Image (cartoon, grey):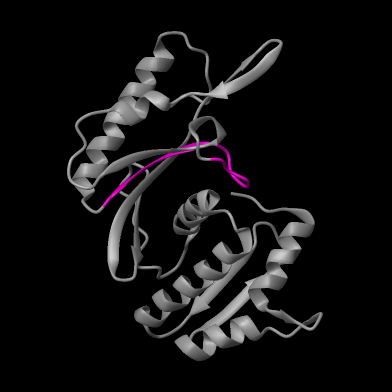
Amino acid sequence: YHIRGRKRFALFLHLLGVEDGGLTGHKTKQIESMTSCRISISGKHHPMKIDITSNSARNIAQGISMIEESLVEYISDGNSEIRLLYDLIATAEGSYSFKKNDGWGMLVREYEGVKSWWALFELPYKGYEGRDGDYHGKFLTRLKPLSGDCKIELFGDGFGVPLEHASPFVLIRGTKHKDVKDAVFAARDAMRRHQGRGCGCTPKW
């Protein structure tokens, strides 16, 4: 997930807080006041870096949620929001206790006290001479059975879920680790069989 150039600077200003045409920092000050965290946002480098520090894991979790809400407010695209939240989990460092990766590309996200496992993969693309190419993966939604509340969702213009800020992707998520892991295995196997038949779509899974 990338925001560059002027939009990136506008995001930096949005996160800090601007009132009456001037930078006041009121948004970060409000988060610091409500969570007892220290918020530091670096907009001079790519990628942008947000540091949230506190002696309390609970306060950090609250601070992360409030920063996420501000980011989601800025992009104003509910479908791209999923990719943004996944990338925030994937790139988190330090004592972010809600980030885990078991080697299957699966991360755990906690929101309002509920933990869910997420696995996200960009869909492969195939171009054609003389016409637009397309992204492959629609067949992944037909995988059965999926256990519990685990579900496979496709995001992208070609799947009826338009994205303004992200490339098409598949998201597999649910509250039980084993259910999501089984679905990830099935999805990877199905995509590799598809690509193994000489389809030519890339990247390879």
The image quarter containing residue 98 is bottom left
Q: Is residue 44 visible?
A: no
**Viewed as shown, does residue 184 lie left or right of 31?**
left
**Identity of the residue drawn at 36% across and 78% down:** 57
Which residue is more in the foreground, 3 or 205?
3
The image quarter containing residue 191 is top left
Which residue is more in the foreground, 65 or 52?
65
Residue with the most extreme right position: 21
Residue with the most extreme front position: 160
The magenta region covers 162-174
Percent position of residue 153, x then y: 39, 39
**Identity of the residue drawn at 35% across and 66% down:** 111
**Identity of the residue drawn at 48% across and 57% down:** 85
Percent position of residue 154, x then y: 43, 36
Q: Is residue 146 magenta?
A: no
Percent position of residue 200, x then y: 52, 13
**Viewed as shown, does residue 10 lie left or right of 196?**
right
Q: Is residue 170 magenta?
A: yes
Percent position of residue 106, x then y: 34, 47
**Viewed as shown, does residue 121 lie left or right of 11?**
left
**Identity of the residue drawn at 65% across and 86% down:** 26
